[in-house]
Amino acid sequence: MSLPTDKTLSYDPLTADNAALILVDHQVGLIAGVRDYSIGELKHNVVALAKAAKALNLPIVVTTTARDSLWGPTFPELVDALPGIEIIDRSSVNAYDDERVAQAIEATGRKKLIFAGVSLEVCAAFPAMTAVARGYDAYVAVDASGTFSDTKRQAGLLRMMQAGVIPSDYASLMVEILKDNARPEAETVYGAIDMPWATLVGQIYTASRR
């Protein structure tokens, strides 16, 4: 019996050279309605993802929708974590339908796109599924996204998976890209994803061997 050859069953790792991060609609008005995570936890996870991606030198695209009329600005902690990065405001529901966002994604030159957005089943799912349709590999950092009910969460995950999007948690995605704990970025990455104790344990172990 031969094994399936579908590419979704093979493992082609994320790396610092093939991945980019796309952050969609982490806006104060949308985050206020999130119910699958606490607002504090969601903010923490998104900021951690952004800081780790920055430490790994990933291209980062950030977008909002109806910033001045409906959903307000990107929450301040995320803005502070990404100084100098332009936030593209648009009117389209699907971020990929905005030509400026599509061009910014294509300009990264990366074929593996990590999405996070509020809400999960729309703001993360729609552009991620569009990316798959355009020939990209798309991932969604589920715990750096959020939505307004358990039904929306479950339906969104099912729809994305059926379309070929790969769901994961933000820390696993960043550690996969880190790849080697000997890299100079490792301490910064682990610190960003709230694992500073990893460095501490290493220091204790090293000291014990002296």
Image (tube, helix red, strand yellow):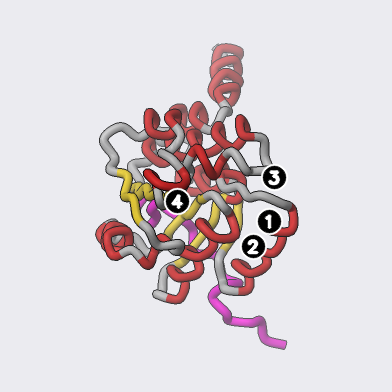
Cα separation, mark 1 vs mark 4, equals: 16 Å
Numbered circle sitting on residue 36: 3
The region drawn magenta spans: 1-22
Could you tell whether 166 is left or right of 18 in the image?
right
Disc 4 from disc 2: Cα separation? 15 Å
Q: Mark 4 or mark 2: which comes first in sequence?
A: 4
Label 4 residue SS: strand
Q: Position of residue 197 (x, y in %)?
A: 60, 22
Q: Is residue 164 magenta?
A: no
| 10 Å crowding of disc 1: few (<14), some (14-19), many (20+) | some
Residue 184 in view (yes/no): no
**Which of 159 and 50 lies nearest the eye of the viewer?**
159
Tell me if label 1 and label 2 are in contact, CB under 8 Å: yes
Residue placed most toward the observer, 172 or 102 = 102
Which residue lies under the disc numbered 2? 156
Whether label 3 touches label 1, CB < 8 Å: yes
